[in-house]
Image: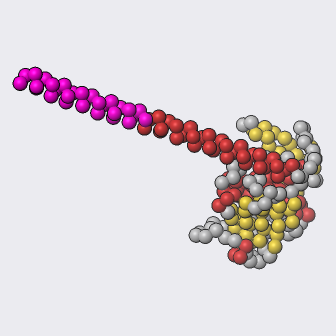
Amino acid sequence: MALIAIILIAFFLTGCIQEQVKQEAKQEKQAMQAMQEPQEKQAEQAEQASEQVEAEEECWAGFGYYNEPTTNFNFDSLNWRIEKEGGITYYKTRLKFVERGGLPILITDVSFRTNPYKLKKINVSLDGWPSKQLYVSYDDAVMKCNDTMVAAVEIGLFLGFSGISTLQQKGKMKSCEDATLDTKVIVIQHKGCYPKVIEKENCITVETACLSLETVEALILRLIEIGIAEGRIEPQ
C-alpha cells in the first residue's frame, strides 16, 4: 500500500510539474509576442513613412530646378531669413499686417518649412482675399500624412495674423457645397500626385498627395502676395 501511495504521489507531482512548465511556457510566449508587437508596429510605421517620402520625391521630380539659398535672401518682394531650430530649417519673413478686420496692426514673423523658391513651383489659382470667416476641412486620407498637423497650425496662425476667423466645425466636416459669399471653405484633400490650389465659387480646394505642408505653405505665400497687392500686408 505504501508503494502504491508513493507511486500516486509521484504521478501527482509529475502532473503538477508538467502543468507548471506549460504555464511558464505560455507566459513566456505571451511576453515574447508582447515584445514583438510594438517592434512590428514600429517597423510597419517606418515602412509607411519611407514609402510616403519616396512618393513625395517622385511628385517633386516633375517640378524641375529651383534655387536652394543658403544665406538670407530677397525673393517675391519679401526679405527672407534662414534659421535652424531643433534641427529644422525655417524660412522666415517679417510682415506688417495692416488691415485685420478692425484688430490692431500686427508686426510678426511668418515661418515656412519649405524653400519659397520651391513653393512657387506649385500651381496656386487664387485671385482674391478670403472673407472675414471661413472653414478649413481635411479629408481622412490627408490626415494620415506626416505633416498635416504642422500645416494645420501654420494656416491657422496665418489666418489669425490676418484677422480672419476660422470657424469651429460641428458634426460633419464642411465641403465646397457649404461655401457662401460670406463664409468660404478651404478643403484640403489627398488627390493626385502634383499638388495644386484651385478656387471656385467661394471654395478653395487644396489638392495634395501627402505634400500637405508644402501645398498649404504655397497657399499662404499666395495669400501674402494678394495681401500686399491689396494693401493689407506690408513687407518689413
Does 212 appear above or below 181? above
- Name the image quarter holding the N terminus: top left
What predominant SS class does the magenta segment belong to?
Answer: helix
Report whether 57 appears left or right of 183.
right
**Image location (x, y in percent) of residue 235:** 89, 54
Residue in the image at 82% along x and 49% along y:
58
Q: Which residues are magenta?
A: 1-29
Q: Is residue 44 left or right of residue 147?
A: left
The spot of residue 26 in percent (x, y) is 38, 36
Q: Residue 165 location in percent, x, y?
A: 70, 66
Quadrant for residue 133, please give it: bottom right
At 57% across and 40% down in the image, what residue appears?
40
What percent of the width, then of the height, locates residue 140?
A: 65, 61
Magenta span has 132?
Answer: no
In this view of the protein, can residue 161 be seen by the observer? no
Residue 105 quadrant = bottom right
By what rule are the colours in the image chosen?
A: secondary structure
Q: Is residue 12 left or right of residue 59?
A: left
Residue under the point 73% across and 48% down: 52
> Taking 36 as reference, is 176 above or below it?
below
Residue at screen point 34% across, 33% down: 22
Residue 3 appears in the rendering = yes
Q: Is residue 101 left or right of residue 236?
A: left
Number of marks: 0
Residue 16 colored in magenta in the image: yes
